[in-house]
Image (tube, rainbow, N blue to C red):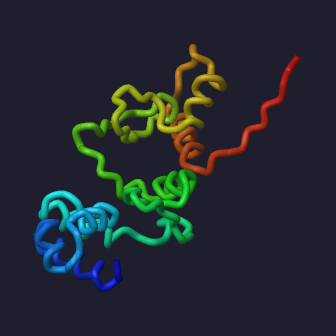
């Protein structure tokens, strides 16, 4: 099959023609047209073909995070990132782009620093960060009452960069 035949099949398929009609116009067998359409994402109903083809045309060729060229398998779906690490780092930098529903977003108050934070999908979260959990669980006395100035200090600590902790074995 020539490139010209491929272009012709693609344009006729996007116009909504069936395999048999395209085969007559192009001058090849119905099975050749069906195989070409299946391997190029043009199979299915005419409306679905248009949607899938536009979506396939708009997929990026480079990773959204690092810009490295994406390697795609012939029948794979939409790929935006070159690795799981790039995907995680990009979503960490762009949390505002997530399509979280308002029904599953909960307002919570941190048990350690008393700041208000929003949790997606988990109503019972107690801490705004892992650092607050560690501070509250292992570094505070459970019988102590917390004053307003202690809360302010905790909030300042929570807003600053997390400190690197060094744990030493005591034994």
Horizontal relation, residue 75 to residue 89: left or right = left
Horizontal relation, residue 150 to residue 75: left or right = right
Residue 39 location in percent, x, y? 34, 63
Question: Relative to 157, does residue 39 appear above or below in the rendering?
Answer: below
Residue 104 location in percent, x, y? 27, 37
Closer to us: 80 or 57: 57
Residue depicted at 41% across the width and 56% down the height: 76
Residue depicted at 52% across the width and 65% down the height: 71
Q: Quadrant of the N terminus?
A: bottom left
Q: Quadrant of residue 21?
A: bottom left
Residue 94 location in percent, x, y? 43, 59
Question: Relative to 90, does residue 12 appear above or below in the rendering?
Answer: below
Closer to us: 30 or 103: 30
Residue 26 location in percent, x, y? 20, 80
Question: Relative to 38, does residue 22 appear above or below in the rendering?
Answer: below
Residue reaching furthest to the top: 143
Horizontal relation, residue 146 to residue 30: left or right = right
């Amino acid at each position: 099959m020539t490139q010209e035949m491929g272009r012709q099949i693609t344009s006729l398929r996007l116009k909504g023609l069936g395999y048999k009609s395209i085969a007559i116009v192009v001058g090849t067998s119905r099975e050749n047209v069906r195989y070409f359409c299946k391997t190029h994402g043009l199979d299915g109903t005419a409306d679905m073909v248009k949607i899938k083809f536009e979506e396939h045309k708009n997929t990026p060729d480079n990773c959204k995070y690092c810009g490295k060229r994406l390697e795609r398998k012939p029948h794979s779906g939409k790929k935006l990132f070159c690795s799981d690490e790039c995907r995680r780092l990009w979503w960490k930098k762009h949390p505002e782009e997530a399509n979280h529903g308002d029904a599953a977003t909960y307002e919570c108050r941190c048990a350690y620093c008393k700041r208000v934070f929003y949790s997606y999908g988990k109503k019972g979260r107690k801490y705004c960060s892992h650092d607050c959990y560690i501070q509250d669980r292992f570094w505070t006395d459970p019988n102590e009452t917390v004053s307003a100035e202690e809360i302010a200090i905790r909030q300042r600590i929570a807003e600053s960069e997390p400190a690197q902790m060094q744990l030493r074995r005591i034994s």
